[in-house]
Image (cartoon, grey):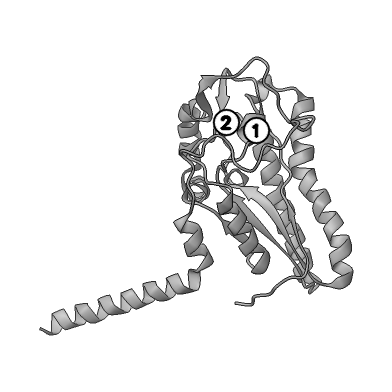
Amino acid sequence: MKRSQPPVVVVTGAGVGVLSRFVDMTLQDYRRVTEVTHLGQVHGTFAALQRMLPRDRGSIVLVGSALTYRGIPLQSAYCGAKHAIQGFHDSLRAELIHARSNVYTTMVQLPGVNTPQFDWIKTDLPMKPKPASPPYQPEVPARAIRFAARHRRKSVKVGWPTLQAIWGDRFASPLLDRYLAATGFAGQQDSEPVSPDRRDNLWQPVPGDHGAHGRFDATARPRSLQLWATMHRTAVLGGVLALAGLGGLAFRATRTR
């Protein structure tokens, strides 16, 4: 596996969302989510390529999501934008390979992350937004993004929930539709009601420095065994093969006796 220390790294991760049924949204809000979450990364990538291509070096990391592969209820605009980024990345990566460019792209697919986004996302639901599954601390995707920037992998997936979403949709998509229809509404709402004076960041930033962590520190996961295995897959594969070899020797010894 070829590794490099790219002199220039650009991470594109713009994103906003609306927690609402599609039929209850305005098309202006839907367009805004698409423009920020999809076109924000497209524009960032375009600007980076203007600098990287003449120098023929650099690394661009696009930030995706488990929702890149599997849409969930109440987030149709965000899911559609993330799906669009995946298609954009496929096309761009093939073009760079065709050009034999030393500029390379990768996409990091994230699970729910304990950032303040759940306090900022626009919602028309009665209860406070929350991630659909226990989130990971932001240091986990930060490690994944740093790793992705230094390796020529097309995609780095973070966390078991991301893999479950991808493989679940691949093998049982219609069943997953029904499961999410039954669980996805309550699963994205917390036990506290939304404050009447709550602000969101759909059309303008929320003032102040809110840090990197959200309000789920008590339940957020500080590490991911799956990510560790992804980052050390050669060692993991070697360990699996070694165990398989030992198992085979033990079986032969048993039969010989």
The correct choice, above or below, for 249 with respect to 218 in the image is: below
Which residue is more in the foreground, 215 or 101?
A: 215
Question: In the structure shown, which secondary structural element does the residue marked by tag 1 occupy?
Answer: helix
At a point 73% along the width and 41% down the height, the residue shown is 37
Extreme residue in the bottom direction: 256
Dot 2 crowding, Cα within 10 Å, few <14, some 14–19, many 20+: some
Image coordinates for residue 73, horizontal then vertical, percent: 57, 31
Name the side, left or right, on which 127 lies relative to 238.
Answer: right
Q: Label 2: which residue? A: 73
Mark 2 lies on a secondary structure that is loop
Instruction: Report the amino acid beneath label 2.
Output: Pro
Q: Disc 1 marks which residue?
A: 76
User: Is label 2 in contact with label 1 (beta carbons under 8 Å)?
Assistant: yes
Residue at point 63% right, 43% down? 212
Image height check: is 70 above or below 181? below
Check residue 111 in the rendering and tell me which mark sits there, or answer none: none
Horizontally, residue 39 falls left or right of residue 236, namely right
Q: Residue furthest top?
A: 196
